[in-house]
Amino acid sequence: MFKKTLIAAAVATLASSVAMADVSISGAVEQTFTDTAGTGSAWTGSTDSSLTFKASEDLGNGLTAFAQITLDTDQTDANTSLTDGKDSKVGISGSFGTIVMGRMEDFTEGKVMSMMTLNGTGAIEATGNTGRTDDAIAYVSPTVNGLHVGVAGYAVTADSDAIDATDMAIFYDNGPLSVKIAQEKNDNAAESLAIGASYAMGDVKVSALHVNRKDDSDSTVDHNDVMLRLDYTMGSNKFTIASLDDEQTTGIDGTDVTAVELTHSFSSRTSAYIGATDSKAANADTTYVGMIHKF
């Protein structure tokens, strides 16, 4: 009887400590098959899977500490970290807003350009995204009447320990209307201005994004991109049509793309999709099909 009581107490203590830790685990597994015209190979496969650990702690006085690590679980390069391409960040939040540091996406790509992200290989995003960067620090203000702002700084060159790039953003959400503006300046390369807006009307959602990218180097072409997107939801199905118009300073048309996609949601966590992109670039027309499960 004493042993049973002792074991029960140990289990209760362990359960209590786990609850206090407030740790959650989530992830996603996505498999896509793509057929690209002119490549000589049909239906090549690609897997994108990740595992995310999140933790938070109530510090009292309205303050909360948090951390997140997202692992790229299908990473096969022995010389590459499991967190390459994924988030690894820590921060603190309160009535003043949120301060976060670590490896993460900038506002321009993660919050604005992502408006045009499709499933699988249906890329409609503009040229020249910075992507995730190490040694970043960002501040996000509280939301007041649907409006909040963000300011971030990070290093983008391996030989520099200084903040050589900045990203400032304004976000407004009010019912069906969403507006996002972000300006990113990189001291070593380019600067970009991204302006996006979306409006939902019942089952229809329309989105527009304009990205102007200027590069300090004469050898790199500047881009002026306009992206449009329409999503129509029919029960468990969603039909998407999107386009990218890429104008370059050289006067030459860039990689203009049109995409169509049909997504069927079996549940809020599981969906399958099929899509196609038509590009002016040589050997770039694609057909893709895939499935994703989130947990």
Image (cartoon, rainbow, N blue to C red):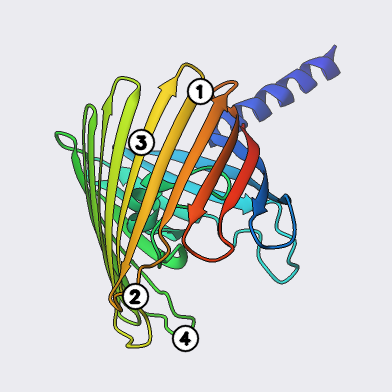
Which numbered disc, 1 or 4, marks the residue closer to the eye? 1
Amino acid type assigned to the residue bearing label 3 in the image: Leu
Q: Badge 3: few (under 14), some or many (20 or more) residues near its Cα, within 10 Å? A: some
Quote the CA–CA distance across marks 3 and 2. 38 Å
Q: Which of marks 3 and 2 is nearer the N terminus?
A: 2
- According to the picture, the residue beneath numbered tag 1 turns out to be 237
Label 4 or label 3, whichever lies nearer to me, is 3
Amino acid type of the residue that numbered disc 2 sits on in the rendered structure: Ile
Where is residue 121 drawn, in percent x and y? Answer: 57, 50
Please give the residue where the numbered disc 4 appears in the rendered image. 159
| x, y percent for residue 125 | 41, 55
Three-letter amino acid code of the residue under disc 4: Asp
Marks 3 & 2, CB-CB < 8 Å contact = no
Q: Distance between the residues labelled 1 and 2?
A: 44 Å
Q: Which residue position is annotated with label 2?
A: 163
Q: What element carries label 1?
A: strand
